[in-house]
Amino acid sequence: MVNSLSGLDRLTEENVSAAMSVVEETGLSRILVTDNAGRVLYDTRETGGAVGSYVLYTEIVQALLGEDASSCTYQGAAFRSRASSPVLYQNQIIGAVYAYEYDTDQAALLAGLQGNLLRLSGVIALVVLVLSLILSKTLTRRIGLLLNAIQQVREGSYSHRADIRGGDEIAQIGHEFNSLTDRLQITETARRRFVSDASHELKTPLAAIRLLSDSILQTDNIDLETTKEFVSDIEQEAERLSRITEDLLRLTRLDSGVLEAPMPVDVLPVLEQVLRMMNLVAQEKEVDLTYSAAEDCAVLGTRDEIHQVIYNLVDNAVKYTGSGGAVQVALGRAAGEVILTVADNGAGIPEADLPRIFERFYRVDKARSRAAGGTGLGLSIVNDTVKRRGGVVEAANRPGGGAVFTVRWPRLEGGGNG
Ligand code: ADP
């Protein structure tokens, strides 16, 4: 439009109308052409055309100042677009062309788009809501399962396990809980067995004492000799009871983890003291008790506990070796270790029982152990005591028959005070 007007030196109503008549049909709602003062020379608006009057729309003012201007607003379900350009003749502004478009089609399209977006947002929000509900439900269900398992175990059913699948953190907590419960179950089973074994061990001598005292009380005119015999039996049973309780107390102390402060102890003097005492028993049983020992075998511990370890092992060896047997004790050193071996030539220990003899109350031959005055706790005391000071105990059978027990303590360089 500006092109078709730019050939004119002055704009008048007539020459503008003539020039505009050759402009192709634009389909615009309104076209205005003004002169350089803003007076309307041409207006396509059918009703109320402004020809002759001054219209000073912002865009027209801008065009008359020499700039192209355009603006677009969306209002009342329609796009209102305005654009204007100056008409120049030899670089002089001689007027302005103003075009206005009122578009409801695109506005309807936009409104439709807006509506669609709104509905889409609604659907997305709903999907997100449902998904998060499902997610939180599964999460709370799994936590609920775990909680239930914890409650069940707390109430004492140690065999209950949390059934949580997957590889996420909750499943990991479930696995950890299950292995914790496994350990708890093992400990609980061991505790129950220990309590039942201990009660059984205490029950037997108590029953014997009752039986013996009942016999004395209920036998009329019982002679002094028989009474003495029964009372000496009662004394033996009482001794056994006190041995068991002493051993139990010793084990409880070891379990509690409260240890006496260790000091350097030279093993040889302790060994010699035990052997002096055990020699009397060995002679009585006609067992040949011999030893060989190296000097300078110091370990960290207490004299009492080392005495206990050596005593229990030598006592067993003498006890389980028949008369005419031989027990050899050897104390030696190896790289960083003090090694004590107690070997006998008795019946040995059946291979199947070897891994279990350090368990509490475990005996290969119950009757024989009882008859020999055993409590079934001696080797577990040895094992626990040695372990607490960083050592190990092993049991094996000798190729020529008999058993051999080996204790290894970490060696203390520089000797001890004995
Ligand atoms: P106990 O008081 O019955 O001797 P221990 O804990 O000292 O209990 O020993 C456990 C079991 O190991 C014994 O009952 C015995 O069957 C077996 N045992 C221990 N030492 C020997 C050994 N030197 N020879 C054969 N069997 C042994």
Image (cartoon, rainbow, N blue to C red):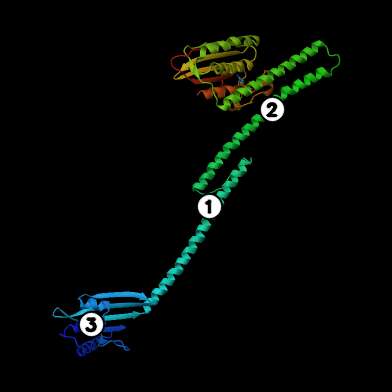
Mark 2 lies within 8 Å of ligand 1 (Cβ measured): no
Element at badge 2? Answer: helix
Check if mark 1's residue and mark 2's residue have beta carbons within 8 Å: no
**Looking at the image, which residue sits at the far right?**
220
Amino acid type, residue under disc 3 in the picture? Gly
> Residue most toward the left?
90
The quadrant in which residue 289 appears is top right
| Residue 33 vertical position relative to residue 360 in the rendered view, above or below | below
Q: Do the residues labelled 2 and 3 touch (CB within 8 Å)?
A: no
Mark nearer the viewer, 2 or 3 = 3
**Residue 301 percent location from the top left of the image:** 51, 19
Q: Distance between the residues labelled 1 and 2?
A: 47 Å
Left or right relative to 384: residue 192: right
Residue 358, quarter of the rendered image: top right
* Element carrying mark 3: loop
Left or right: where 263 falls relative to 230: left
